[in-house]
Image: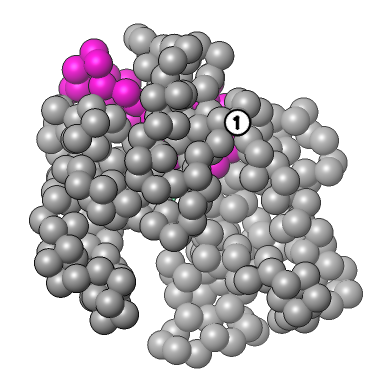
Amino acid sequence: MKNIGIIGSGTMGIGIAQVAATNNCKVFLYDQNALQTEKSLEGLQKVLARLVEKEKISQEESEGILYRIKFCTDLKELKDCDLVIEAIIENKEIKQKVFKDLEEIVSDECILASNTSSISITSISSELKNPARFLGIHFFNPAPLMPLVEIIPGLLTEENLPQKIYDLMKLWGKVPVIAQDIPGFIVNRLARPFYGEALRIVEEKIATVEQVDDAMRTVGNFKMGPFELMDLIGIDINFSVTKTVYADYFYDPKYKPSLLQQRMSEAKLHGRKTGKGFFSYAKDAVKPVP
Ligand code: NAI
């Protein structure tokens, strides 16, 4: 698989593009928002410059990665792709619409995948003409650094497809795992109570955001506390995932979303990507939002 299409150049899309381009694939990266594309390109240039500075890659490799990523303004530019990975907003209907459009553009052999964190793969594929070529390929944030990739066949996915993607992910240096099509798959199901309890502790004024994060880093030996991590993931994305998992487990109270997270999402306090979440990311200052 040489030509990889990616839809959505946000947090995940640009990271997956970097992974594929590092592995010598030609990447066609499409986003409906041209401003986002520019922002992503700038971000990637900075990431690559840092890697060169730290001597993790050479200047030539950095240029090669950038050269292999084509930023597209029209979905039709993905027509020759062997595999397309969608990484847009976490919304089933919008994802279904994108795949319907895509089916009219790519060849019958092209594999279609979603990077969804929580939406049923079977349900996204249900509107496709050929759902057998569809599956979930779930990277973690930041995609170039996190080794795990969940591969999720839906009920209608062709039997040999998960193994084919498993082999590709190995080739890309990842640690793939084949997961069942259940809400949140493995990691996001397991992580729901982690974020949920952290939010409840703050809502009940048992501890502050900083105290919770400090405790988890110090005692739990976690690299990041739950609030830092939510800011990294994006509060909007994290909230959408929780809502999906809650609804898809038939409103099991174990997964109940937090009102604090809902209000922050409404206020667009999405974390790093908007400059403010549980912490502020203005310049170098990392301070709790008042
Ligand atoms: P993001 O909000 O950073 O980026 C989404 C991008 O998609 C934006 O640039 C937006 O302009 C674009 N977009 C939205 N609708 C579009 C459409 N119809 N056509 C083309 N482009 C469109 O979101 P993020 O965080 O990259 O998440 C993307 C997907 O990856 C979601 O399904 C999310 O659940 C999943 N994911 C997110 C992780 C995270 O930590 N943020 C981790 C793993 C998966």
For this view, does 42 lie left or right of residue 114? Answer: left
Identity of the residue drawn at 39% across and 57% down: 144
Label 1: which residue? 179
| Residue 181 in view (yes/no) | yes
Decide whether residue 121 is among the magenta residues: yes
Identity of the residue drawn at 58% across and 46% down: 240
Amino acid at dot 1:
Ala
State the SS at label 1: loop
Q: Is residue 25 above or below residue 260?
A: above
Identity of the residue drawn at 25% across and 69% down: 57
Identity of the residue drawn at 28% across and 77% down: 55
Q: Quadrant of residue 226?
A: bottom right
Q: Quadrant of residue 88?
A: top left
Q: How many marks?
A: 1
| Residue in the foreground of this view, choosing between 146 and 239 | 146
Residue 150 percent location from the top left of the image: 53, 38
Q: Quadrant of the C terminus?
A: bottom right
Q: Which residues are magenta?
A: 96-123
For this view, does 82 lie left or right of residue 201? Answer: left
